[in-house]
């Protein structure tokens, strides 16, 4: 019995908590992706690069003496116009064509490629490690947990709650949901649909940038940092249901636990194929995912 | 501009009658012929100057052109975007490498094994992927390739992250004559011959009723059953066909490079194939071949003065998506036909 408690306390629980802090971060990424898909029908392949951009922006601004708390506000604000322009200049250009699903996917794929190489050009290909803004750790039930991870879990959950509130409990959110449900009807009722589109895209991009700021102290910063992370976020969005906010949260927390625990019981190298296998299975059996789409639920 | 905003097939006779069908088809094949002559000219110059490096580079471009053609079969002719075509390319490469290294150094055996493996895997992948449509199809093909790539990456018996090395050079027999894969010129000519054969065969097939049904699926899948066709069967068939083409192209890779690595299955390979098709010209088959040669040359030239060629390729790719919906070949053909019309109307 004592062995079992030890196992729970020193092996399983820390792994699950690590999974939870990763899960919160993945959910933040997935939220941006899923809102953009839910409203604009766009699979944003450049999302991972926007995440990397956020991390690099944070690194640069921190080098200029901006504090961590200010970064949490400043970086998303700086990412907003970038997202706005990306939507106006690229997505809107092909938005009314018959193949817009494919064309927007291809455009954001190209954009991601360029952004990644630009980051390499400006910052070099090497890995950089920002300082940990919240040092130390706390002992909970005999487990030692780094304070930063605890902060990440708390802050991330608060942020997810805030996004949920904005989308489902404000007039702005109602406009977004109305535009997602029927853009023509929303437009005729006075919703500025084009601005809602650009604004929502910018909002998703800002969320990705914010995830970059939050995760930089844990996973370090390099130009291709978005790649592995984005795959997980895509899987989460697909499993949860593309365009579903609840789905992104549930699937994000669930899948990161699968990843964390499978790396304990099977092997860390097999957790990726396992998670992608789940993605393929869900696409086969229930392509709409676990939950309904934004504005349609 | 509804015309420019759809991914149209250039060799698509569509509503045209038989006479105009010939005149509309011809330019694409003329382009292919011009390309073939240029390729032979290039081979002659490279051989005369003893430049094996460029011959090998061109051979690699042709091999990846095979992969791009398979993406074009799905995207250009059927309207299905595959983000995981590298799965079959890599499969063909690994099967060919294993056959050449462990079974027998036989070209035909390696190709046959790759074809068989590609067909089987394509059948399984096709049944899975064709359960869904649109973006979900793109994502499921992407996911399948990721599972396969990560599995190969983790499998010790397949060399894990290092891949398989030491694939022997072989002699390829055609009855009484044979050629050596170690010789850059003869291997280039062999791959060129295979590419031309694939182009001719696939073009023929795309003009046959099979290809016309695919075009109908691309235009409006919901109406295809009303004409008495089973769209699902055709989509599965073209998926298997594309997998076979990709696997055959992949089978040539270890003969050229002497090794295979899991990178061949990664998303970058699949993504590059899509870029090649878009830049070259969707739905033309010759476009992917030209796109592959152009992009390989570009990477080699730009890569010689900066390692940041992705920016250049990315910009070209995005410009093609926005402005050149029919790619390089489409732009060339538009110019050709404009000149043709000008010639006809001139007294």
Image (cartoon, rainbow, N blue to C red):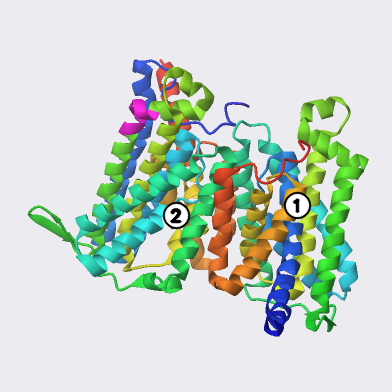
Q: Nearer the viewer, residue B78 or B3?
A: B78
Same chain assignment for discs 1 and 2:
no
Kindly identify which residue carries mark 2: B86
The crowd level at tag 2 (other Cα within 10 Å; few <14, some 14-19, many 20+) is many
Circle on res. A32: 1
Measured Cα–Cα span from mark 1 to mark 2 = 28 Å
Determine whether the residue tagged by mark 1 lies in a helix, strand or loop.
helix
Give the percent coordinates (x, y) of residue B303: 50, 64
Among the 4 quarters of the image, the one containing residue A132 = bottom right
**Residue visible at 46% across and 25% down in the picture:** B216
Judge whether residue A79 is colored magenta.
no
Q: Nearer the viewer, residue B110 or B285?
A: B110
Give the percent coordinates (x, y) of residue B263: 46, 64
The crowd level at tag 1 (other Cα within 10 Å; few <14, some 14-19, many 20+) is many
Q: From the viewer's perspective, tell me whether residue B21 is left or right of residue B107.
A: right
Among the 4 quarters of the image, the one containing residue A196 = top right
Q: Chain of mark 1?
A: A
Q: Chain of mark 2?
A: B
**Residue visible at 34% across and 39% down in the picture:** B32
Residue B345 vertical placement versus A107 (above, below): above
Q: How many marks?
A: 2
Q: Are marks 1 and 2 in contact (CB under 8 Å)?
A: no
Q: Main secondary structure of the magenta part?
A: helix
Give the percent coordinates (x, y) of residue B9: 46, 31
**Residue visible at 85% across and 52% down in the picture:** A163
Would residue B307 be visible to someone looking at this image? no
Give the percent coordinates (x, y) of residue A195: 83, 39
């Amino acid at each position: 019995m004592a062995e079992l408690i030890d196992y729970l306390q020193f092996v399983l629980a820390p792994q699950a908590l690590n999974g939870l802090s990763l899960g919160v971060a993945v959910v933040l990424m997935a939220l941006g992706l899923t809102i953009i898909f839910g409203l604009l029908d766009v699979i944003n392949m450049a999302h991972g690069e926007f995440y990397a951009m956020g991390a690099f922006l944070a690194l640069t601004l921190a080098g200029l003496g901006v504090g961590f708390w200010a970064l949490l506000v400043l970086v998303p604000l700086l990412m907003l116009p970038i997202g706005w322009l990306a939507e106006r200049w690229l997505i809107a250009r092909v938005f009314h064509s018959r193949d817009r699903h494919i064309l927007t996917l291809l455009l954001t794929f190209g954009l991601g490629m360029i952004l990644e190489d630009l980051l390499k050009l400006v910052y070099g290909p090497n890995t950089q490690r920002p300082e940990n803004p919240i040092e130390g750790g706390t002992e909970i039930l005999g487990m030692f947990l780094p304070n930063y991870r605890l902060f990440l879990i708390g802050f991330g959950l608060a942020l997810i709650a805030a996004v949920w509130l904005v989308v489902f409990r404000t007039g702005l959110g109602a406009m977004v949901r109305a535009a997602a449900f029927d853009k023509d009807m929303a437009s005729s009722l006075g919703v500025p649909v084009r601005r809602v589109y650009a604004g929502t895209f910018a909002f998703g991009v800002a969320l990705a940038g914010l995830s970059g700021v939050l995760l930089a102290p844990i996973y370090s910063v390099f130009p291709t940092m978005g790649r592995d992370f984005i795959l997980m976020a895509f899987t989460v969005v697909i499993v949860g249901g593309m365009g579903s906010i609840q789905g992104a949260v549930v699937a994000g927390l669930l899948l990161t636990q699968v990843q964390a625990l499978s790396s304990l019981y099977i092997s860390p190298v097999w957790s990726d194929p396992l998670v992608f296998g789940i993605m393929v299975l869900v696409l086969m059996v229930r392509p709409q995912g676990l939950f309904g789409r934004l504005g349609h639920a | 501009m509804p015309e420019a905003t759809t991914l149209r097939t250039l060799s698509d006779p569509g509503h045209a009658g038989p006479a105009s069908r010939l005149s509309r088809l011809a330019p694409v094949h003329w382009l292919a012929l011009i390309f073939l002559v240029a390729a032979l000219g290039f081979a002659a110059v490279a051989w005369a100057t003893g430049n094996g490096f460029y011959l090998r580079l061109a051979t690699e471009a042709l091999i990846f052109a095979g992969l791009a053609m398979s993406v074009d079969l799905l995207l250009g002719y059927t309207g299905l975007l595959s983000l995981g075509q590298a799965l079959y390319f890599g499969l063909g490469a690994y099967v060919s490498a294993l056959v050449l290294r462990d079974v027998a150094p036989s070209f035909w055996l390696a190709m046959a094994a790759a074809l068989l493996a590609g067909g089987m895997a394509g059948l399984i992948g096709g049944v899975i992927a064709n359960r869904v449509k649109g973006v979900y199809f793109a994502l499921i093909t992407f996911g399948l390739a990721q599972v396969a790539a990560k599995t190969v990456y983790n499998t010790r018996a397949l060399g894990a992250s290092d891949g398989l090395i030491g694939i022997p050079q072989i002699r390829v027999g055609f009855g009484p004559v044979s050629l050596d894969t170690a010789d850059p010129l003869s291997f280039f000519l062999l791959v060129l011959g295979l590419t031309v054969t694939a182009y001719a065969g696939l073009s023929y097939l795309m003009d046959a009723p099979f290809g016309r049904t695919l075009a109908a699926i691309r235009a409006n899948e919901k109406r295809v059953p009303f004409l008495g066709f089973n769209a699902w069967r055709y989509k599965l068939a073209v998926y298997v066909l594309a997998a076979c083409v990709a696997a055959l192209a992949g089978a040539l890779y270890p003969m050229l490079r002497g090794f295979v690595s899991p990178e061949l299955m990664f998303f970058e390979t699949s993504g590059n194939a899509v870029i090649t098709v878009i830049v070259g010209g969707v739905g033309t088959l010759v476009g992917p071949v030209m796109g592959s040669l152009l992009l390989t040359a570009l990477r080699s030239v730009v890569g010689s003065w900066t390692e940041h060629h992705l920016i250049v390729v990315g910009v070209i790719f995005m410009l093609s998506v926005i402005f050149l919906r029919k790619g390089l070949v489409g732009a060339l053909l538009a110019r050709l036909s404009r000149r043709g019309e000008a010639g006809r109307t001139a007294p």
